[in-house]
Image (cartoon, rainbow, N blue to C red):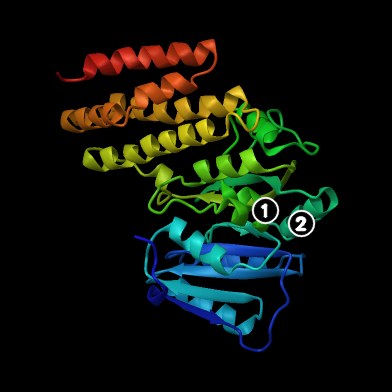
Amino acid sequence: MPYRKEDITLSMNPHSEIPSPLLSVIVPMYNAGKSFQAFIESALAQTLQSLEIIIVNDGSTDESAEMAHRYAAQYAHIQVIDQQNGGVSRARNAGLAIARGQYVTFPDADDTLYPDMYRKLVEMAGQDDLDVAQCNAERIFWGDDNARTLIPTDRLRSTGVLSGAEWLGKALSTNRYLHVVWLGIYRRELIQQLNLLFEPGLHHQDIPWTTELMLNARRVRYTEEVLYRYYVHDQSISNQKRTGMRNVEYQRHYLKIARMLDEINQRYRHKVNIAPAVYRQVTKEALTVCHSIRREPDAEARQAIIADVFATKTPGIMLRNTRGAQQWYQLLLWLIRIWRWRQK
């Protein structure tokens, strides 16, 4: 159910009307806890002056909500949207609805930004009239001081200007690229033209959103420079261990993502040159569900996942999008397995 206007309140500094900024920083926040202070301080330390920070408080019940309002009262370029808890997609959509920047970005409230991140990305975008400017990041696990580069430079180096379809194919072919919206800035006008919103209730909704945006982007550039710090903790959606019906529900998100990606490919295949790696990602997402069947210890849950695979016609989706001998081998192997495992 989409959010209702009566579920949302907006708090912003009333001191003065702020001119439209170059960048709108949209921050979904749900119980970010003490991590939020480190994030907001890194956002305030940005060397880019022309920006607005839109914090979408998605029904937080901890100290982060009060902290966000304190910062909004103190800084004129920060505002807070309070809404009932509805998930990160609805939070991002709510921020997009009031954003005024030429570009938008979507950092997470428990990560941190390098001070020059947004200045460098906005300068890249201005110099080359980009629809998208993206950077590299580092990943750090809670309790571990060792940061690791998110996208290894031996897999992907800085690029010149590419079309979005070219960039997506190049990035996905490395097998190290992540569909995460916090890696870049995006032209707001293009998002509006496409009426491109995040899918409510869908885990990993960045995947179909970035795919469709890139297939429409004219000019994209990537820098291998690390400008964002991504923290991984036990509460991260992708790190939670699930078995039984919780796993069944989780795998339905991947099945939906595979279907959405297939629909995107079908919609744009006569409009842009879609690289083989972009097709392969559809089958790759669906194959994660096949792997989950083998790992699932509960027999009833295994059969439920298999039933979902066939009910959603996922085998046909995978067959339509598989590219390359290696992926064909993997696909046929897994289809044989799940046919064997399926109870008649």
Residue furthest to the front in view is 270
Checking the image for residue 60, the label placed there is none
Percent across and percent down for residue 191 are: 61, 53
Foreground residue among 269 and 217? 269
Name the N-terminal-most of marks 1 and 2. Answer: 2
Q: Is residue 146 visible?
A: no
Checking the image for residue 185, the label placed there is 1
Is the C-beta separation of discs 1 and 2 under 8 Å? yes
Quarter holding the N terminus?
Answer: bottom left
Please report the residue visible at 51 percent of the width from the left and 76 percent of the height from the top. 67
Percent across and percent down for residue 17 are: 68, 83
Residue furthest to the bottom in view is 15
Please report the residue visible at 40 percent of the width from the left and 52 percent of the height from the top. 235
Percent across and percent down for residue 36 are: 53, 66
Indicate whether 178 appears above or below 235. above
Q: Which residue is tagged 2?
A: 122
The three-letter amino acid code for the residue at tag 1 is Ile
Please report the residue visible at 42 percent of the width from the left and 43 percent of the height from the top. 238
Quadrant of the image occupied by residue 173: top right
Q: Is residue 116 left or right of residue 168?
A: right
Q: CA distance from mark 1 to mark 2?
A: 8 Å
The three-letter amino acid code for the residue at tag 2 is Val
Residue furthest to the right in view is 127
